[in-house]
Image (cartoon, helix red, strand yellow):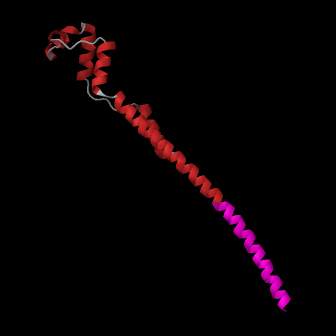
């Protein structure tokens, strides 16, 4: 009887040692993956920090002003470039002005019948 119990315990101990062995290596693999992911996260955080610093430099208003002055050749707005609202109709040609007046004074139109058909079709057939 003692032999059967001893043999059972030896087999049980062997099976448990194999399970512990397998779990140990699975844990080591997961720890390695965790270290790799943490290393990648740190590298990405450093990259984001560098990109934020570069973004701040690129969007510096003083730097942008210097670049605009150097490359765009823009001049400040002068008084003769500004106009009154009443003077706008004098600047637009007659045929264009009548079209614009028709569009401005026209009542708001209802949606296109094609659009209405599409929306009702969607409601009927989801």
Res 98 seen here: yes
Q: Which span of residues is magenta-colored?
A: 1-27
Q: Quadrant of residue 16?
A: bottom right
Q: Quadrant of residue 60?
A: top left
For the stretch drawn in magenta, the main secondary structure is: helix
* Near-viewer residue (76 or 7): 7
Residue furthest bottom as drawn: 1
* Near-viewer residue (114 or 1): 1
Q: Quadrant of residue 111?
A: top left
In this picture, residue 74 sits left or right of residue 31:
left
Q: Is residue 101 magenta?
A: no
Q: Residue 87: x and y, percent?
A: 15, 12
Q: Note whether 3 is above or below 64 in the view shown.
A: below
In this picture, residue 5 sits left or right of residue 83:
right
Q: Residue 120: x and y, percent?
A: 45, 41
Q: Residue at x 60, y 57 (%)?
A: 31
Q: Residue at x 46, y 43 (%)?
A: 45
In this picture, residue 72 sits left or right of residue 90:
right
Q: Note whether 32 is above or below 45 in the view shown.
A: below
| Number of marks drawn | 0
Q: Residue 86: x and y, percent?
A: 14, 15
In this picture, residue 25 sits left or right of residue 46:
right
Res 126 seen here: no
Q: Residue 14: x and y, percent?
A: 78, 74
The N terminus sits in image quarter: bottom right
Q: Residue at x 57, y 52 (%)?
A: 35
* Near-viewer residue (97 or 37): 37
């Amino acid at each position: 009887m003692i032999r059967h119990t001893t043999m059972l315990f030896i087999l049980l101990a062997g099976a448990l040692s194999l399970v512990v062995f397998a779990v140990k290596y699975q844990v080591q693999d997961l720890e390695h993956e965790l270290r790799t992911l943490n290393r990648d996260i740190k590298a990405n955080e450093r990259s984001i920090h560098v990109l934020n610093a570069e973004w701040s430099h690129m969007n510096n208003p003083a730097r942008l002003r210097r670049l605009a002055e150097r490359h765009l050749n823009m001049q400040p707005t002068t008084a003769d470039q500004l106009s009154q609202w009443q003077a706008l109709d004098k600047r637009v040609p007659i045929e264009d002005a009548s079209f614009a007046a028709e569009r401005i004074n026209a009542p708001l139109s209802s949606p296109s019948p094609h659009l209405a058909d599409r929306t009702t079709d969607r409601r009927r057939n989801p």
